[in-house]
Amino acid sequence: MTVAGRRKFRREGEERRRQDLIEATLDCVAEHGLQGATVRAIASRAGVTAGLIRHYFPGKEELLQASYATIMGRMTELAKTALATVEQDPRRRLAAFLEASLVPPVIDVRTFSIWGSFIGRAGSDPALGVAHRAGYLGFRDEVETLVAEVFSGSGRLASAGELRRHAIAINAIIDGLWVEGCLAGDMFENGELAEIGIGSVEAMLGLRLRREELA
């Protein structure tokens, strides 16, 4: 029991250290861009030696890939938390997900700065490209599942291709409004971008998401 307990503690400790290195990397990217996120800068930020980083990651590229995957996954998880706050009605769940994707803390200048630094290299860096694809598909899959539930609950049949196209389009609506909110949030009223996003998706699907009686 004692040995097993030590092993569990060690695994938890190592995972915590690995996450600390990822957070230090994200801080460096936010403040200095990818060029400024050197191994030395990351180690200094995390309060460790550069050699220790190589214990957890084969190299800087793998650390950057893990960091990008973390920031992408975090935005998806923040949007998903809204699903636990609403009733199980599929339309309200989709509306809640859309709203959460277009208000703070998902709309955030620091997050945008980090994302912008990574996305600039995702097309030319295979490792970052893999992380971007995984993050994009993870978010789009969540949207597609929610849309499928809305159609099913409304008695509408939809092919796999139709659901996929709706998910792609909704993801594009969210992305565009998210960028605007991060770059110029002071130009919009509280909740305005979320209302626009929900309204656009309602028009696309031909369904009211928060006022079912009008559907």
Image (tube, rainbow, N blue to C red):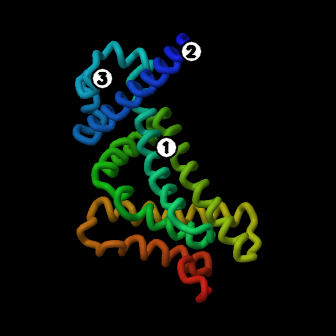
In three-dimensional space, the C-alpha distance between marks 2 and 3, rounded to whole angstroms, equals 34 Å
Query: Could you tell me residue 175's position as x and y percent?
Result: 44, 60
Residue lying at the far front of the rendered structure = 1
Which is nearer the N-term, disc 1 or disc 2? 2
- Of residue 89 and residue 159, the one placed in the foreground of this image is 89
The residues tagged by marks 1 and 2 sit, at their Cα atoms, a distance apart of 37 Å
Q: Which type of secondary structure does the marked residue at label 3 adopt?
A: helix
The kind of residue tagged 2 is Ala
How far apart are the alpha carbons under marks 3 and 1? 22 Å
- In primary-sequence order, the first of circles 3 and 1 is 3
Secondary structure under the numbered disc 1 in the rendered image: helix
Q: Residue at x 37, y 44 (%)?
A: 120
Location of the N terminus (image quadrant): top right
Give the residue at mark 3: 39
**Which label sits in the foreground, 2 or 3?**
2
Q: Quadrant of residue 170?
A: bottom right
Q: Which amino acid is tagged 1?
A: His
Secondary structure of the residue carrying numbered label 2? helix
Q: Is residue 171 above or below residue 3?
A: below
Q: Nearer the viewer, residue 86 or 105?
A: 86
Which quarter of the picture shows residue 19?
A: top left
Reading the image, the residue beneath label 1 is 132
Q: What is the x, y in percent for residue 122?
A: 44, 41
Q: Earlier in the sequence, mark 2 or mark 3?
A: 2
List the residue tagged with mark 2: 4
x, y percent for residue 179: 36, 60
Which quadrant does the C terminus fall into?
bottom right
Instruction: Pinpoint residue 143: horizontal percent, then vertical percent.
Output: 58, 60
